């Protein structure tokens, strides 16, 4: 029986590759948007505008305090009530962007706060504008602190894409879930799903370990 | 499109009555979430400690399985691990209730992260400390007991509290294998009354309460730690 199911699994392997492609798509698009949004929010958070800082603080607390699956449900079920209709794929990307940008915002704000005030003052004294100070002086130095946790966060984001399968996005986890209904070999099916996730995220884990060692000095 | 589309203000007809009606359900859900998280974090601490002990030991037969366990858990999503056990255990002939499957999954998942937290704490102890222990004639266990662990364990308290916050949030995924916890209550209310706004905002409220309690505990322990290190 095992062997029979195994050959069935080999037969439908292209289905898994489709799921892998979907997961990769969601992961890449959301990593990109999260990084941009996260940097903007992080820079604003370490700025001087108190109201803006508070607002971002509330947003970050909301995202960090609730499970991602609840956030996905909120985006997918509550937004339509307010007249915003989203397809599952769009809802997935929106939920990922909301969640990821909050975590990256914290990392960026932490990195910027690690830069001493003297650096900013030296920038001002050299006649740089605020944008130039950020771009030429602060961010390049802060990157040293930001990069290792950022790559670590990327790994977490890739893994969190599995949660969007609950709203019917045909990603790797959903493919496994559908398959297990037809091939009742849970261990085999989800080992395969696990291996495919491992293939995407393990290189990033190694990169994050390397960066941590490299930047620690 | 549902009839009677909501307009004006987004929460114009936010229905508190229905929330009160469902409050007993939410409270059982909350209790279940507490129970699952509490039991899982205890078991995960035990698993994590054992895994860490194996990870740092010099016996290869213990070290490499521990590395494999930690790396596999860290590079696959929790949801896949939950489904692996949920659909996999019955094929091995093991039939347990969903809640136990869920607790095992959370225990194995958090155990791997806790092993890494404890290991980071132990490796953060300065080499000079260990050398002075060696030169004072202490053996391995005495060095662990009197020098390394007292210093290392303090440093692990804030990240362990951080991990318990993560675990409470992770327990929401058990709703997908129909464990009746907080998120599942929100889903139940949504499917019975078609009121996702009320349902999920209530769920959010409860999770935020747990988050703020654990977060202030974590911040407090961090402050306490810095204070102690200053002397």
Image: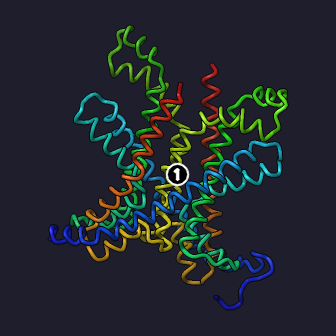
The quadrant of the picture occupied by the N terminus of chain A is bottom left
- The quarter of the picture where residue B27 lies is bottom right
Q: Which residue is mark 1?
A: B166
Residue B128 appears anywhere in the view: yes
B67 versus B153 height, above or below? below
What residue lies at 59% left-to-right and 73% top-to-bottom?
Answer: A76
Residue A160, image x, y percentages? 49, 58
Residue B192, image x, y percentages? 55, 83
Residue A179, image x, y percentages? 32, 73
Q: Secondary structure at mark 1?
A: helix
- The quarter of the picture where residue B57 lies is top left
Residue sitting farthest toward the bottom: B3
> How many labels were placed on the picture?
1
The chain containing the residue under callout 1 comes to B
Residue B123, image x, y percentages? 44, 27
Q: Nearer the viewer, residue A140 or A195?
A: A140
What residue lies at 69% left-to-right and 80% top-to-bottom?
Answer: A83
């Amino acid at each position: 029986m095992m062997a029979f199911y195994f050959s069935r699994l080999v037969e439908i392997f292209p289905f898994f590759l489709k799921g892998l492609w979907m997961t990769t798509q969601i992961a890449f698009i959301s990593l990109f948007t999260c990084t941009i949004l996260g940097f903007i929010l992080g820079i604003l958070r370490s700025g001087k505008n108190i109201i803006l800082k508070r607002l971002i603080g509330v947003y970050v607390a909301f995202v960090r305090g609730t499970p991602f699956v609840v956030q996905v449900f909120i985006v997918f079920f509550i937004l339509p009530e307010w007249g915003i209709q989203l397809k599952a794929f769009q809802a997935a990307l929106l939920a990922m962007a909301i969640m990821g940008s909050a975590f990256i915002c914290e990392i960026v704000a932490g990195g910027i706060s690690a830069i001493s005030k003297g650096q900013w003052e030296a920038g001002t004294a050299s006649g740089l504008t605020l944008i130039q100070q950020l771009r030429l002086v602060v961010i390049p130095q802060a990157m040293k602190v930001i990069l290792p946790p950022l790559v670590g966060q990327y790994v977490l984001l890739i893994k969190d894409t599995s949660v969007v399968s609950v709203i019917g996005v045909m990603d790797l986890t959903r493919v496994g879930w559908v398959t297990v209904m037809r091939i009742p070999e849970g261990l085999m099916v989800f080992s395969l799903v696990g291996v495919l996730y491992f293939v995407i995220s393990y290189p990033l884990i190694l990169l994050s370990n390397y960066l941590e060692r490299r930047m620690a000095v | 499109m549902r009839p009677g589309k909501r307009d004006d203000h987004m929460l114009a007809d936010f229905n508190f009555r229905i929330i009160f009606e469902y409050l007993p359900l939410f409270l059982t859900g909350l209790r279940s979430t507490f129970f699952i998280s509490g039991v899982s974090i205890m078991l995960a601490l035990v698993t994590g400690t054992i895994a860490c002990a194996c990870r740092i030991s010099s016996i290869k037969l213990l070290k490499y399985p521990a590395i494999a366990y930690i790396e596999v858990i860290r590079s696959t999503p929790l949801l896949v691990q939950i489904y692996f056990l949920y659909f996999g255990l019955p094929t091995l002939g093991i039939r347990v209730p969903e809640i136990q499957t869920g607790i095992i999954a959370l225990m194995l998942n958090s155990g791997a992260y806790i092993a890494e937290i404890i290991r980071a704490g132990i490796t953060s102890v300065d080499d000079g400390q260990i050398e002075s222990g060696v030169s004072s004639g202490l053996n391995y266990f005495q060095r662990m007991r009197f020098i390394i662990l007292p210093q290392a364990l303090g440093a692990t308290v804030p990240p362990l509290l951080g991990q318990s916050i993560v675990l409470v949030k992770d327990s929401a995924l058990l709703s997908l294998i129909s464990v009746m916890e907080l998120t599942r209550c929100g889903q139940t209310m949504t499917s019975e009354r078609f009121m996702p706004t009320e349902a999920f905002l209530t769920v959010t409220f409860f999770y935020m309460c747990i988050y703020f309690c654990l977060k202030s505990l974590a911040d407090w322990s961090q402050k306490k730690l810095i204070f102690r290190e200053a002397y």
